[in-house]
Amino acid sequence: MQPKFSEDVIPLSDLKVNPGKVVNHAKDSHRPVLVTSRGRGIAVLQGLDEYEKNIEELAFTKAIAKGMLDIKEGNKSNIDDVKARLGL
């Protein structure tokens, strides 16, 4: 989910003062929180569920891209061979 800059950008000092509040905001909003120092972004805080979802989506996207590249390069398998390899 896209961050809302009015809510999801916080200074490092806020994180130091009340880390639980910032962590809960990231977890409950399902949006990353940008942590800044002297007006510049230095870190992103993200809820674990969202992080794991993003990792899974990235792996899925990479697998699709690899499959499409295989097709483009002519690396194809016969459906009967695939079924045999999978024991179907």
Image: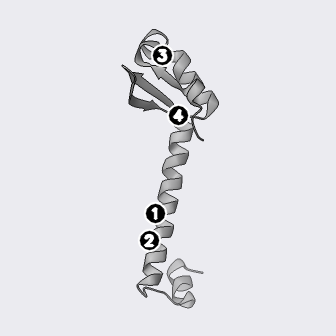
Which residue: 55% across, 27% down?
8
Q: Say few, some or many: other residues with alpha carbon within 10 Å of mark 1 (under 14 / 14 to 19 / 20 or more).
A: few
For residue 24, which quarter of the picture? top right
Element at label 2? helix
Label 1 vs 3, first from the N-terminus: 3
Could you say which disc has been placed on residue 32 in the image? 4
Label 3 vs 4, first from the N-terminus: 3
Label 3 vs 2, first from the N-terminus: 3
The residue at which mark 1 appears reads as 62
Task: Give the CA separation, mark 4 to mark 2.
Answer: 28 Å
The residue at which mark 2 appears reads as 66
Which residue: 61% across, 35% down?
30
Foreground label between 4 and 2: 4
Element at label 3? helix
Amino acid, disc 2: Lys
Task: Give the CA separation, mark 2 to mark 1.
Answer: 6 Å
Task: Give the CA separation, mark 3 to mark 4.
Answer: 14 Å
Mark 2 near mark 1, Cβ–Cβ under 8 Å? yes
Label 4 vs 2, first from the N-terminus: 4
Amino acid, disc 4: Pro
Q: Say few, some or many: other residues with alpha carbon within 10 Å of mark 2 (under 14 / 14 to 19 / 20 or more).
A: few
Amino acid, disc 1: Lys
Q: How many marks?
A: 4
Which residue: 55% across, 16% down?
21
Judging depth in this view, the residue of 23 and 37 nearest the camera is: 37
